[in-house]
Image: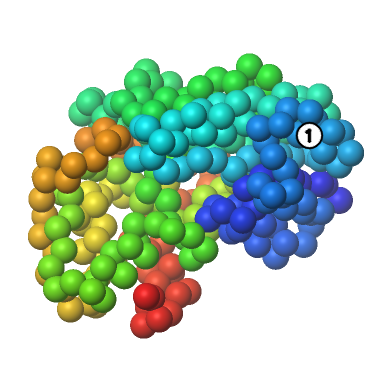
Amino acid sequence: MKKVIVTGANGQLGQDVVLLLEEKGEYQVIPLKKEELNILDEEAVRSSFQTIRPDWILHCAAYTNVEAAEDDGKELNWKVNRDGARNVSKAAADVNAKMIYISTDYVFDGTIAKQYETDDATNPINQYGAAKLAGEKAVLEHLPCAHIVRTSWVFGEKGHNFVYTMLKLSKKMDTLKVVDDQYGRPTYARDLASFMLYIMEKDVPGGIYHFSNDGEATWFRFAKSILKNEDVQIIPVESTEFVQKAKRPKYSVMSLEKVKQTGFIIPAWEDALERFMKNINVSKVD
């Protein structure tokens, strides 16, 4: 039975990854929360991996507060997303483990008028994207055959995300203004976890992959779908109406062709959202 370490096991994606692996019943799953493994401590990571001797590392641990990463959280952002990724990949290489590292569409600046391919030039415009890109490079330095999976707009039952934010605001407000000039792809954490498992089971070659649910949207269009059964007016606005510390790419739609070529069937984001909504009790969203 293969041993699989999941870092960030108490995070939004990590919880779904652990659940899916346990449902499969074919792996010895070692879920490691940040309290159980400090990825910033290189020696602790090395010692842990030497003891466990994992076959796979699914590196879901990350610093994801995009706004805070610009100032108060800048140092921690770089420590977790770059240095932590380096420590994990270095320790994985020492025990000959394979690794999946989750990255982001924010490695791109959003200025080209086409979907981003995996080999397109990167140019992050915020600290979060820059640190995640540095993490990619650190992983590939130690594990050239690692799997880098860039994703975007992640939502899952077990985390804080845009879907829950919209549902909560709709209970308190009659009108919501939502940005309609930023384009991307929503990603259901459960589907991302399924692709990660697929990589392991199908021996998908290492390299950079872009994974989100199929189809593109603006935040406004996404919000309209989320709140289609709620009594709230949603007004499309330009991003200039919201003052944010971190710049966001205007168009960060990533091509899914490389994933599709592996044979993995990617559900549309509308389908993913529908499945998500069936799995939560909307009436109890505070």
Res. 121 image quadrant: top left
Q: Is residue 91 left or right of residue 147?
A: right
- Disc 1 target residue: 44
Helix, strand or loop at mark 1: helix
Residue lying furthest right: 51
Q: Is residue 45 left or right of residue 221?
A: right
Residue in the foreground of this view, choosing between 85 and 100: 85
Query: 158 above or below 259?
Result: below
Residue positioned 22% across, 35% down in the render: 250
Residue lying furthest bottom: 283
Instruction: Give the amino acid at mark 1.
Output: Ala
Residue positioned 36% across, 82% down in the render: 283
Numbered label tally? 1
Category of crowding for the residue at label 1, using alpha-carbon neighbours closer than 10 angstroms: few (below 14), some (14–19), many (at least 20): some
Name the quadrant of the C terminus: bottom left
- How far across and down, in percent of the image, does residue 78 sit? 51, 28
Res. 101 image quadrant: top right
Residue positioned 52% across, 63% down in the render: 158
Query: 178 above or below 228?
Result: above
Residue positioned 48% across, 60% down in the render: 159
- How far across and down, in percent of the image, does residue 181 sit? 16, 43
- How far across and down, in percent of the image, does residue 103 sit? 49, 35
- How far across and down, in percent of the image, does residue 23 sit? 70, 65
Residue in the foreground of this view, choosing between 183 and 67: 67
Query: 160 above or below 104?
Result: below
Q: Is residue 139 left or right of residue 220?
A: right
Residue in the foreground of this view, choosing between 212 and 265: 212
Q: In this view, does 28 lie to the left or right of 150?
A: right
* Residue 220 seen: yes
